[in-house]
Amino acid sequence: MFQQVAQSHLPVIAAVNGLAVAGGFELMLACDLVVAASSARAGCGHARYGLLTGVGGATRLVRAVGPTVAKYLAFTGDLLTAEALASYRLVNEVVSDECFEQRVDELSQRIAASSSRGIALMKQMIGDAQDQSLAAALRMEYDLVGLHAASPDVQAGIGAFRARTTPDFVGLGRDHE
């Protein structure tokens, strides 16, 4: 399931409100964006119970924060505050508890208003760029941009920009959304 979350063509937002420990932390790492309530706490936690990450947590963690921080978080099992998670770049945004649900909804709606086809391709480009050389990632990006240029969403976006209106995107279609 965690790999399905990470590989979904749609962006997945982790809304962390409370604790995200062990599997919850690994799920958070599999998501594209993370919004945390100011009172949230999260961490690996496995070491405290003699467990190992089992669904990609160690791999995603080291890619997100580097080996020094990943080892610290994995070895200690410490639960970090939302602010500390943000300082390690594991959280995109920390929001007050009172505004948390509203902010997650706003972010979701803002992304949903974009071209689902364009967002899916950007997600693919960013994900693939992590695993490839710069030259290979740039070639792939150029190829995808070329293919996407003929998309109805590009035409709708350019037309709306010129007319100063809101674009009406076709996106991926209902069978993919």
Image (spheres, helix red, strand yellow):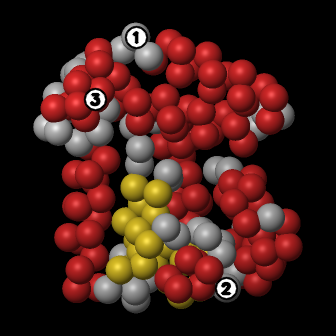
User: Which residue in the structure is indicated by mark 3?
Assistant: 157
- Residue 175 falls in which quadrant of the image? top left
**Cα distance, mark 2 to mark 1?**
49 Å
User: Which residue in the structure is indicated by mark 1?
Assistant: 150
Assess whether mark 2 and mark 3 are in contact (beta carbons under 8 angstroms).
no
**Cα distance, mark 3 to mark 2?**
45 Å
Taking 151 as reference, is 130 left or right?
right
The residue at the point 69 percent across, 54 percent down is 60
Q: Nearer the viewer, residue 115 or 67?
A: 115
User: Which residue in the structure is indicated by mark 2?
Assistant: 78
The residue at the point 32 percent across, 86 percent down is 96
The residue at the point 29 percent across, 19 percent down is 155
In the image, is residue 2 above or below residue 14? above
Crowding around mark 2 (Cα neighbors within 10 Å: few <14, some 14 to 19, many 20+) is: some
Crowding around mark 1 (Cα neighbors within 10 Å: few <14, some 14 to 19, many 20+) is: few
Assess whether mark 1 and mark 3 are in contact (beta carbons under 8 angstroms).
no
Locate residue 37, reporting x and y percent: 37, 80
Closer to the observer: label 3 or label 2? 3
Locate residue 149, reporting x and y percent: 44, 16
Taking 43 as reference, is 67 left or right?
right
